């Protein structure tokens, strides 16, 4: 009975301190803005492999994926505009500390609500999968119509000034010829 209790406690301890991810991302951006999403691996212990997949809604586009030198024997990055991945394999030395998985540069294409889904999976040094809860980031992409209206207003003001200047020059030329 004591052995079962100890085994149960060991299993519970591993579950409580399972690998997890944290994500740093803005909650609101402007249309056309390029922003950075950072992913971190937390509570890492005896990690033999780690994969992080990122999916974005159709009003966002992944421009760049940056992985880091985290002591992995193998590292792969993939970028397909609406999907990206970073993979690490720790073959000779399992990872036993938290680390920054990577950065994703994303462009907000159209205004509206956007969603970013971060899915990750890890494995221990024996190759057993460690499930990590996915993170869903809801993002508001705001239209920059106010800025465009200001530009148009400023531009129309310049046209008025130009027309007024042409009229003045014409009057001056008319007066000089008289």
Image (cartoon, rainbow, N blue to C red):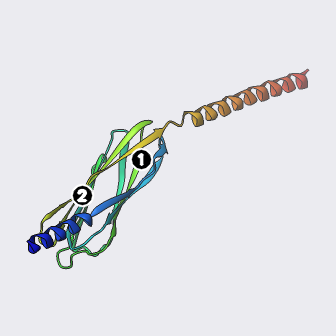
**Label 1 element class:** strand
Q: Residue at x 78, y 26 (%)?
A: 164
Q: Where is residue 26 in the image (x, y as percent from the top left)?
A: 45, 50
Above or below, 110 against 1 in this view is above
Q: Name the residue under label 1.
A: 107
Q: Can residue 78 be seen in this view?
A: no
Q: Which disc number belongs to residue 132? A: 2
Q: Do the residues labelled 2 and 1 touch (CB within 8 Å)?
A: no
Q: Residue at x 38, y 40 (%)?
A: 114
Q: Position of residue 109 (x, y in %)?
A: 42, 40
Q: Residue at x 30, y 46 (%)?
A: 82
Q: In this view, does 91 lie to the left or right of 177?
A: left
**Label 2 element class:** loop
Between residues 93 and 129, which one lies in front from this camera angle? 129
Tell me where residue 146 sits by quadrant.
Answer: top right
Numbered disc in front, either 2 or 1: 2
Q: How far apart are marks 2 and 1 (CA)?
A: 26 Å
Is the N terminus in the top left, top right, bottom left or bottom right quadrant? bottom left
Q: Can residue 89 be seen in this view?
A: yes
Q: Residues within 10 Å of mark 1 (few under 14, many from 20)?
A: many
Q: Position of residue 35 (x, y in %)?
A: 45, 52
Q: Which residue is drawn at 33% across and 69% down?
A: 99
Above or below, 173 against 123 in this view is above
Q: Which disc number belongs to residue 84? A: none
Dot placed on the residue nearer the N-terminal end, 2 or 1: 1
Q: Residues within 10 Å of mark 2 (few under 14, many from 20)?
A: some
Above or below, 178 against 48 in this view is above
């Amino acid at each position: 009975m004591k052995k079962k209790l100890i085994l149960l406690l060991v299993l519970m301890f591993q579950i409580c301190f399972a690998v997890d991810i944290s994500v740093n991302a803005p909650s609101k951006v402007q249309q056309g803005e390029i922003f950075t999403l950072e992913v971190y691996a937390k509570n890492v212990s005896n990690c033999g492999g780690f994969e992080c997949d990122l999916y974005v809604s159709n009003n966002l586009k992944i421009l760049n994926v940056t992985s880091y030198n985290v002591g992995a024997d193998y590292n792969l990055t993939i970028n397909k505009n609406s999907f990206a991945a970073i993979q690490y394999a720790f073959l000779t030395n399992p990872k036993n500390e938290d680390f920054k998985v990577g950065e994703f540069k994303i462009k907000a294409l159209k205004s509206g609500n956007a969603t970013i889904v971060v899915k990750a999976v890890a494995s221990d040094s024996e190759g057993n999968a460690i499930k990590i809860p996915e993170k869903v980031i809801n993002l508001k992409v705001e239209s920059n119509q106010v800025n465009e209206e200001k530009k148009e207003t400023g531009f129309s003001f310049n046209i008025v000034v130009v027309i007024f200047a042409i009229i003045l020059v014409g009057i001056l030329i008319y007066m000089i010829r008289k």
